[in-house]
Image (cartoon, grey):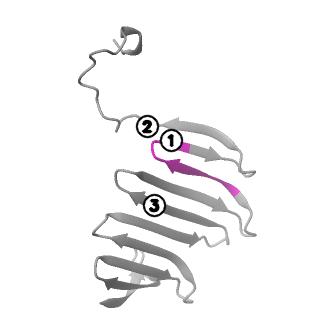
Amino acid sequence: MSEFKNVLNDSSELVGYSYQVTEGNVTSTTFFDTNFEITGEAFSDSSTSVSSSYNKVVASDGSYKETGSYSKPGEESRSFEFNFDKDGKFTGGTETEGIITYTYNSSWEVTGTKTDTSKLPKISDVTGVPDALLDS
């Protein structure tokens, strides 16, 4: 099955189009702007829960933001948000791999990291774990 749709913004204005194809468990969507330039893609496989996406949004001044993600449940995940000026020069962004988020400056240097431990499993059996390694 395939389907072509208009893409509207929050003000119900036409901002582009999408074309979706589903074959078996796999759905692939391509996004276009109003000039039919490709601005993004999405892929998902319902049998494996693997998914990926990429999107490029251009601002009125010509600068743009690229966002994307990849997920394979139980194994890996990655997402990013990269910013570029109107000339295509990288101006900074973030990238998350698993539980670690990296912040980059315009030279692609890591300027910060943050670790989200909120989704780590709780340890219920601490038998044999030295007290010095346990959080009181």
Quadrant containing the N terminus in the rendered view: bottom left
Mark 2 in CB contact with mark 1 (< 8 angstroms): yes
**Depth order, front residue of 87/77:** 77
Residue 111 highlighted magenta (yes or no): no
The quadrant where residue 10 appears: bottom left
Span colored in magenta: 91-101
Which amino acid type is marked by label 3? Tyr
Q: Would you name the residue on which mark 1 appears?
A: 100
**Depth order, front residue of 61/88:** 88
**Depth order, front residue of 13/89:** 89
Point out residue 102 in the picture as x, y percentages from the top left corner. 58, 44
Q: Would you name the residue on which mark 2 appears?
A: 116
Dot 2 or dot 1, earlier in sequence: 1
User: Residue visible at 71% across and 64% down?
Assistant: 85
Point out residue 58 in the picture as x, y percentages from the top left corner. 60, 72
Q: Would you name the residue on which mark 3 appears?
A: 70
The quadrant where residue 20 appears: bottom left
Kindly report the distance in space between the C-alpha atoms of the residues bearing marks 3 and 1.
15 Å
Kindly report the distance in space between the C-alpha atoms of the residues bearing marks 3 and 2.
18 Å
Image check: 108 left or right of 53?
right
